[in-house]
Image (spheres, grey):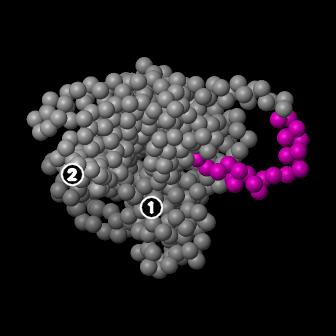
């Protein structure tokens, strides 16, 4: 592959500004409304999210390795050296803790900038870089003759030597030459200042990518990029960006697609991570979060409950209008499933006469309790709470061909411990094998999830804006189920 030559960064294009994130906009609206109306400030949840980001950002850069168990302990209890055994990481535990504290301090600086309405400037950029690299003394550079050498890391100062990496295939990826860095960063901030009216996730993606294109520092650029991306998201009342180590390959691939002019994959990736963080936040046990905050003023606050009771009832009724969206999507799913199975039936008949059934579920069908265990288990595994005290809807399709049966379920359920106005669709299947005898007894069954990512919608969702996206999501889930079923036949 040929070398990738440096090109000056470009402003947000009309095509990028129109990236379709409509299906998730309503989630952001509901989250902002929840923050504004709720008296619960999820300090502990946010602190854990920041600690998780602080751990993962260094693993992405391969500064250190850390096992999952120790990661969870540090996220839950804070950066305490006693929690880190020597076998849990590939660097000294004391050094690891210092680096993690630096990463955490950088995000706290980002939060202070938002609180104090401090704009993103070169000064802030240098301060972030100095904090993030506080315990990093050196880095590797390449001189004009191509010789690799270890040099002191300039902290809070732009690079003085090229930092162009060599890819595994031997090609060179050229970042901005040192002489042009100042001008490129000026352009970055000038354009950013004019983008307040655009979708914050798209802007965060654009800023992240363009900053990495410049690569203004000798080292630490990825960490700084993720920090300033979080700044854009927090400013928009969203949550910090956490890119897990397991997503590193996808993350890099999306950045490379953006190098080629397509920002949509990176924006969709960031939107997916943001949505997941919001759904987890809504699943936090709020009572546990605020138990230590109860004071004598609670009596005064509680006395106002009756006054605001009717207002709360109105709000609850509004949040539950999301059920109308769920019913519409259930109908759409039913039609899509019927059309697909009608097309599939002639192929199945080449083998034997198939038994095909499609049915709806929900409070209106008196069977809303079906599949509660599967839905609840799947949600818990992904760090969310399926609120099954609210209405639960589903569509069930089954295909029976000789000894093998496929049951494909699309579930529509509320998310969060309390009523939030947010629901998600998930899809899962059961593969069943029956005895080849008159009794036809079930001899084996297998459960598997067909939708790694849920389809999220809210009471503010515009159905027309998400119909196509939902059909694509459902088609992908069905393809997974039918592939597994086909392998059985």
Residue 65, compared with residue 250, is above or below; it is: below
* CA separation in Å, label 2 and label 1: 59 Å
**Residue at figure coordinates x 65%, y 26% from the top left:** 317
Query: Would residue 289 be counted in the magenta stretch?
Result: yes
| Location of residue 395 (image quadrant) | top left
Query: Would residue 135 be counted in the magenta stretch?
Result: no
**Residue at figure coordinates x 82%, y 35% from the top left:** 305
Is label 2 or label 1 in front? Answer: 2
The residue that disc 2 covers is 437
**Residue at figure coordinates x 12%, y 39% from the top left:** 351
The residue that disc 1 covers is 58
What stretch of residues is rendered in magenta? Answer: 277-305
Q: Position of residue 170 (x, y in %)?
A: 17, 57
In front of the other: 393 or 315: 393
**Residue at figure coordinates x 56%, y 55% from the top left:** 50
Near mark 2 (Cα within 10 A), the count class, few <14, some 14-19 or many ≥20, is few
Asked if residue 30 lies left or right of residue 434, the reply is right
């Amino acid at each position: 592959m040929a070398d990738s030559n440096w090109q000056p960064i470009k402003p947000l294009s009309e095509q990028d500004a129109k990236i379709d994130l409509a299906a998730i906009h309503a989630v952001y609206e509901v989250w902002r409304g929840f923050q504004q109306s709720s008296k619960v400030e999820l300090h502990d949840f946010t602190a854990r999210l920041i600690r998780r980001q602080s751990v993962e950002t260094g693993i992405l850069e391969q500064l250190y390795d850390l096992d999952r168990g120790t990661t969870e302990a540090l996220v839950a209890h804070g950066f305490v050296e006693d929690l880190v055994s020597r076998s849990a990481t590939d660097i000294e535990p004391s050094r690891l803790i210092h680096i993690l504290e630096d990463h955490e301090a950088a995000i706290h600086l980002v939060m202070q900038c938002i609180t104090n309405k401090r704009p993103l400037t070169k000064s802030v950029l240098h301060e972030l870089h100095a904090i993030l690299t506080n315990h990093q003394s050196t880095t590797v550079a390449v001189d004009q003759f191509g010789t690799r050498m270890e040099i002191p890391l300039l902290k809070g100062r732009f690079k003085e030597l090229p930092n162009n990496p060599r890819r595994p295939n031997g090609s060179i990826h050229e970042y901005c030459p040192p002489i042009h860095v100042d001008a490129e960063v000026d352009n970055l901030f000038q354009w950013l200042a004019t983008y307040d009216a655009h979708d914050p996730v798209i802007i965060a993606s654009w800023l992240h990518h363009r900053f990495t294109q410049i690569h203004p520092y000798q080292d630490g650029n990825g960490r700084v990029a993720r920090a300033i991306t979080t700044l854009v998201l927090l400013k928009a009342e969203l949550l910090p960006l956490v890119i897990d180590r397991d997503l590193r390959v996808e993350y890099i691939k999306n950045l490379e697609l953006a190098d080629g002019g397509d920002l949509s994959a990176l924006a969709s990736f960031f939107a997916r991570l943001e949505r997941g963080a919001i759904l987890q936040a809504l699943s936090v046990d709020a009572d546990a979060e605020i138990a230590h905050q109860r004071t004598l003023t609670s009596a005064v606050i509680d006395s106002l409950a009756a006054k605001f009771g009717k207002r709360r009832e109105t709000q609850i009724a509004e949040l539950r209008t999301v059920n109308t969206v769920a019913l519409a999507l259930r109908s759409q799913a039913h039609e899509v499933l019927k059309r697909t199975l009608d097309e599939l039936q002639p192929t199945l008949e080449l083998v034997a006469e198939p038994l095909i059934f499609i049915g709806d579920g929900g409070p209106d069908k008196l069977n809303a309790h079906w599949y509660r265990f599967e839905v609840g288990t799947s949600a818990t595994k992904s760090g969310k709470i399926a609120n099954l005290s609210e209405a639960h809807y589903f569509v069930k399709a089954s295909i029976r061909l000789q000894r093998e049966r496929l049951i494909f379920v699309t579930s529509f359920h509320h998310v969060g411990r309390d009523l939030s106005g947010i629901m998600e669709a998930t899809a899962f299947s059961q593969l069943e094998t029956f005895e080849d005898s008159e009794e036809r007894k079930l001899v084996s069954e297998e459960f598997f999830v067909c939708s790694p990512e849920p389809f999220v919608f809210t009471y503010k969702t515009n159905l027309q804006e998400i119909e196509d996206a939902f059909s694509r999501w459902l088609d992908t889930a069905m393809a997974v189920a039918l592939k597994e079923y086909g392998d059985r036949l």
